[in-house]
């Protein structure tokens, strides 16, 4: 039988190159498309709407399926503009993260655009499922970036049982073909894979960042709340050890204040993202590099095509 995700997205293998803040770009996604999978890019990777439009024109010209990731909580003050542009370009699929997908689904569904919703627990999955998205992305405990808290072995089957009419995509913990097969065996229709693609030739980040992914293992991955206020996985560099991984007493105090909470979230998010950007593209001792436990599968810097080959093992779906 034809794989459901492959059929939905018209791809050869049921794999999405996950949208990664700062890392994902058109070059990576086009390489992914050429290799028989697809990929998504965070809209926030583009500083201006003009830059975003240039990227969408390039992706659209491929004539293939690609996706855009939208952060849908209050920290993203550009959401309305980004959603409007996505709708104008009829982006094939949207991945929503960190908030309610309601507005995105309302805009995209009439245009025939698919919406996949990141979910990290059953309560939030129920809220998203009630809006009838095209798929739920089960962000599990092994995911990089803003990870979940439930192991894939529990989360994927639970979502499949609770929402039998909604396709489930597993995100986290997959770095080779056996990992893909394991997730499909749990009931997922496909996987979303990010970290193994950071250290690719097409990736725009610094050589230091890529080499750090080669040199470090899953035991070097830690959770920090200092970047966005939400737990996020990073490589435990000396600088991360120096600044700590938890919010300080003032940040915690302000987070409890109803009046200040919204603005603090935006401030923490902006400061954290600026810090990630500085570390990703320049030589600095302030190295805060986002990555997940699947750095274990990175042993050298190589083309996107070779990472896809590792994930598919020559298998056709």
Image (spheres, rainbow, N blue to C red):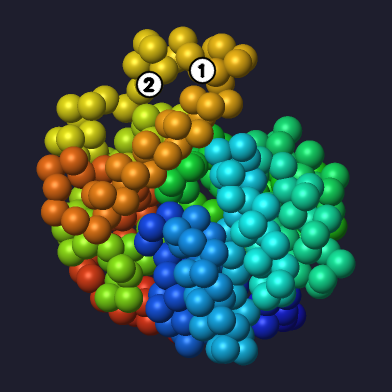
x then y, percent, for residue 241: 20, 30
- Mark yes or no: residue 82 visible: yes
Name which residue lies at 62% across and 14% down.
258
Above or below, 267 against 178 in this view is above
201 or 255, which is in the foreground? 255
Q: Quadrant of residue 105?
A: bottom right
Describe residue 121's horizontal placement relative to residue 310 as left or right.
right
Describe residue 9's horizontal placement relative to residue 181 as left or right.
right
Q: Which class describes the residues within 10 Å of circle 1: few (<14), some (14-19), or many (20+)?
A: some
Quadrant into which the C terminus falls? bottom right
Label 2 secondary element: loop
Numbered badge on residue 247: 2
Name which residue lies at 49% across and 61% down.
48
Q: Quadrant of residue 259?
A: top right
Marks 1/2: CA–CA distance: 10 Å
Nearer to us of marks 1 and 2 is 1
Numbered badge on residue 255: 1
Above or below, 27 against 278 in this view is below
Name which residue lies at 58% across and 26% down.
262
x then y, percent, for residue 21: 43, 55
142 or 103, which is in the foreground? 103
184 or 147, which is in the foreground? 147
x then y, percent, for residue 277: 31, 51
Disc 1 + disc 2, Cβ < 8 Å:
yes
């Amino acid at each position: 039988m034809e794989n459901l995700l492959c059929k939905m997205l018209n791809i050869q293998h049921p794999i999405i190159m996950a949208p990664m803040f700062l890392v994902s770009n058109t070059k990576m996604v086009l390489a992914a498309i050429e290799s028989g999978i697809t990929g998504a890019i965070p809209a926030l990777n583009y500083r201006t709407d003009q830059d975003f439009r240039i990227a969408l024109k390039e992706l659209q010209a491929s004539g293939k399926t690609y996706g855009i990731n939208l952060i849908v909580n209050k920290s993203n003050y550009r959401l309305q503009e980004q959603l409007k542009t996505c709708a104008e370009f009829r982006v094939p699929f949207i991945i929503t993260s960190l908030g309610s997908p309601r507005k995105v689904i309302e805009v995209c569904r009439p245009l025939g655009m698919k919406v996949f919703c990141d979910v990290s627990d059953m309560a939030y999955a129920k809220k998203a499922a009630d809006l009838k998205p095209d798929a739920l992305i089960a962000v599990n405990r092994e995911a990089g970036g803003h990870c979940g808290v439930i192991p894939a072995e529990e989360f994927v089957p639970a979502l499949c049982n609770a929402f039998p009419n909604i396709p489930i995509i597993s995100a986290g913990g997959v770095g080779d073909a056996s990992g893909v097969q394991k997730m499909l065996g749990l009931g997922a229709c496909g996987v979303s894979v990010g970290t193994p693609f950071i250290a690719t030739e097409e990736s725009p980040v610094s050589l230091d960042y890529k080499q750090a992914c080669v040199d470090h293992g899953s035991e070097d991955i830690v959770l920090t709340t200092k970047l966005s206020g939400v737990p996020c996985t990073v490589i435990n560099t000396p600088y991360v050890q120096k600044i700590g991984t938890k919010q300080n007493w003032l940040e915690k105090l302000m987070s409890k204040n109803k009046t200040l909470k919204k603005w603090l979230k935006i401030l923490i998010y902006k400061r954290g993202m600026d810090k990630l950007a500085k570390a990703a593209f320049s030589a600095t001792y302030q190295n805060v590099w986002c990555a997940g436990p699947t750095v274990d599968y990175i042993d050298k810097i190589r083309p996107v095509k070779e990472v896809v080959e590792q994930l598919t093992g020559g298998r056709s779906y």
